[in-house]
Amino acid sequence: MIDLLLLIVLPYVALAVCVAGTIYRIKKNSLSYSSLSSQFLESRGLMWGSLPWHIGISVIILGHLAALVAPQPFQQMLSYYPVLMGVESVGIGLSLICLAGILILTVRRITSSKLQAVTSATDLLVLALLLLQVGLGLGIAMHHRWGALWGAGLASPYILSILTFRPDAAMVQDFPHLLKAHIVGAWLLILLIPFSRLIHIFALPIHYLSRPPINVVWNNARRKESNEETFVKEEARRHFLRGGIGVAFGVMLLSAGAFDKVFRFFFGPRLSKHQETELMEAKLERLEATTAQRKLELERQKNDYILIGTLDELSPTSGKYFIDYEMRPAIAFKGADGLPLLISAKCTHLGCTVGNEMNAEGKILCPCHISFFDVKTGEPNADSPAKAPLPHLSWVIRDKEGEIVLRRNAQGPTIGNASLPDLKEAKVYISKSEGQA
Ligand code: FES
């Protein structure tokens, strides 16, 4: 029930209020359609807070939008580990920059008496929510790694389902609490847009960087003398700002990875005895898994044939998983001719393991992003995210004396002349010598 309220009802209320409220505010008082600058009241803190905040949050929002607008290319790009590492590190670096910026802006609002006079309760609420959002984003990056990858696969479909009026929170309702809070925080901020300075996000001051400078002319005699000087300063400031943005980007990209490491070194988890025990157990499990994997690799390196099971064991509809020579998952079915049909189970989209249950159309499903593959041909459905077929694997059959009586090279012809009745107690092996399709 609470999920329904926060993940379905709240988004629609937020979007409706945001659209209607923004239009109303623009029509009613178009001059309020900005962030209501407080630079005249306090400029130093504004520069140190606003610049990092806006640079950081703009890139972070663009990243979120990219994942929303093109989730599949985004995920594909992130399926390369170095890219994923880079995006996560840059995300953490930017979040830290944002955190510094929003903290400075909040302290400035609270401590300056001039600003207190023009600060409303909504301003403070928005600042608190923004602080919370940045904190939650950092928490997610620290505790639920690779959010950029799985976020695009799970959160983007949820948001698209809301925007296309086919609400479906199934993808996110089992998310960890940190993540749900981040999503709810985002909807609350959207809800507050028409009632706060946040409305200025619809009035991006991009033209500032390219428009000709404005010369503010003072009538006051003393100030008049400094008109020219002010004009030159304004132009210089603009050049500095452009250069500063470029340099900040470069530095941020270079230092983001280092930030991540330093942060982890100083603020890594402090473990209790119980947690340490759990960690040791987990490490031991990983070591055992690695040992088991090395044994499998060695077995494949040493042998030309690896046993899958007996022919009788294979089923036409419920495949048996095994590991192929490339250490990838594969599935063994019994084909319509009563002989083995071996197919790779590593999805050709992003590498998930494909299910082993064949449906009535002779297809198996990759559940990650719903790709169906024809077991006989390996081809994916035309509308599947996967575009390449699953390859078939070579096999041999040995009779009960251990003699190879039948073999097939991937989808090639079956070689040998044993008939099915001869194959009682026969065993099926994957074959290295013949290679894979
Ligand atoms: Fe995306 Fe299989 S990994 S459909």
Image (tube, grey):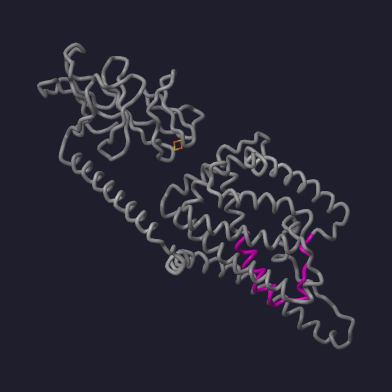
* Residue 224, position as x, y percentages in the image: 85, 84
Q: Which region shows up in magenta?
A: 34-57
Q: Residue at position x 26%, y 48% from top?
A: 288
Q: Quadrant of residue 328?
A: top left
Q: Quadrant of ligand 1?
A: top left
- For residue 196, side relative to residue 129 (left or right): right
In the displayed image of the protein, which residue is found farthest to the front?
A: 274
- Quadrant of the drawing holding the N terminus: top right
Q: Residue at position x 80%, y 75% from top?
A: 215
Position above or below: 153 against 46: above
- For residue 75, side relative to residue 27 (left or right): left
Q: Nearer the viewer, residue 89 or 211?
A: 89
Q: Residue at position x 62%, y 40% from top?
A: 160
Magenta stretch: includes residue 289: no
- For residue 59, side relative to residue 365 (left or right): right
Q: Nearer the viewer, residue 23 or 282?
A: 282
Magenta stretch: includes residue 41: yes
Q: Residue at position x 47%, y 27% from top?
A: 381
Q: Quadrant of residue 402?
A: top left
- Quadrant of the drawing holding the C terminus: top left
* Residue 410, position as x, y percentages in the image: 27, 27
Q: Quadrant of residue 214?
A: bottom right
